[in-house]
Amino acid sequence: MNIVITGASKGIGFEAAKHLAAAGDHTIVAIARNEENLKQLKNACLHENIKAKVFPVPFDLGVLNGIETLLVKQILSFISNVDILINNAGVLVNKPFAETSLEDIQETISTNYLAPSILIRALLPHFASSAHVVNISSMGGFQGSAKFAGLSAYSAAKGAIAVLTECLAEEYKDSGFRFNCLAFGAVNTEMFKMAFPGHTAPLEPSEMGKYVADFALNQARYFNGKVIPVSSATP
Ligand SMILES: NC(=O)c1ccc[n+]([C@@H]2O[C@H](COP(=O)([O-])OP(=O)(O)OC[C@H]3O[C@@H](n4cnc5c(N)ncnc54)[C@H](OP(=O)(O)O)[C@@H]3O)[C@@H](O)[C@H]2O)c1
């Protein structure tokens, strides 16, 4: 399969890419800003599967007007179509709402919502007939869930990507494409430490990465337009 994954330089995205590489001879286009980390990802994938085809694409998804041109051109230089798109890249600002600057809000909305929206739109003409889009949200953006002070911009952006998923599944329901959204609970990554300093999450990035890889590869037949909470916390 031809797989595009964003936010693959560390955390859950890095681990998901490794599990995708281990799961078969897939071609993986791995996007993030940190080029060195993406090179390490490629080596880690080759360690999992000597036949792994991993193409690092260093790109800042905050540069929205480059997505449809520069980024898509680079993606299509490695793969002719897209079977799986995992919009995993994310950024979190942890500040009281009153101290949240315009730049904070713009960066949070751009990375977590606008960039995936534009990337989906730009790749639509290149989707394989049964393409599966997996958007990554958060329990903070899951309707009716417990909310946390300081995470307003982040949680609102994650809510937006969840609703976009439902809308696209409806709009493209006759196309064969599938759109789903995973709303993660806490996972021990750099982002989690920013959100909840001094706390430990119940899951490690490798465990969630494996879940994402399995879901993206195997669950499109069973889910479409679903926002799925992936969390063991109650309620
Ligand atoms: N960890 C949790 O508890 C948790 C809970 C709920 C949801 N999530 C979601 O899970 C996803 C992965 O998070 P994580 O915990 O693994 O976070 P992480 O360790 O901070 O990784 C975030 C990834 O996003 C990439 N990224 C951020 N801004 C980018 C930009 N402008 N352009 C390109 N790539 C960018 C980062 O790469 P570069 O810095 O190299 O660009 C990195 O690869 C995110 O969408 C997050 O919101 C996480």
Image (cartoon, rainbow, N blue to C red):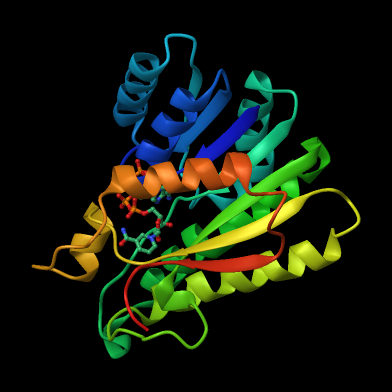
- Residue 198, quarter of picture: bottom left
Q: Say whether residue 46 is visible.
A: yes
Total marks shown come to 0
Which residue is painted at 40% across and 30% down in the image?
A: 18
Q: Is residue 88 left or right of residue 128?
A: left
Q: In this rendering, is residue 5 above or below 181?
A: above
Q: Nearer the viewer, residue 136 or 230?
A: 230
Q: Is residue 202 left or right of residue 218?
A: left
Question: Residue 205: where, in percent of width, then height?
Answer: 30, 47
Q: Say whether residue 33 is visible.
A: no
Which residue is painted at 79% across and 49% down in the image?
A: 177
Name the outermost residue toward the left: 198
Question: Residue 219: where, in percent of width, then height?
Answer: 63, 49
Q: In this rendering, is residue 121 above or below 101?
A: above
Which residue is painted at 32% across and 22% down in the image?
A: 44
Question: Residue 62: where, in percent of width, then height?
Answer: 48, 52
In the rendered image, which quarter contains the N terminus? top right
Which residue is painted at 30% across and 65% down in the image?
A: 186
Q: In this rendering, is residue 152 above or below 133?
A: below
Q: Nearer the viewer, residue 61 or 63?
A: 61
Q: Is residue 125 left or right of residue 6?
A: right
Q: Nearer the viewer, residue 42 or 93?
A: 42
Question: Residue 119: where, in percent of width, then height?
Answer: 65, 48
Name the outermost residue toward the right: 174
In the rendered image, which quarter contains the C terminus? bottom left
Name the outermost residue toward the top: 50
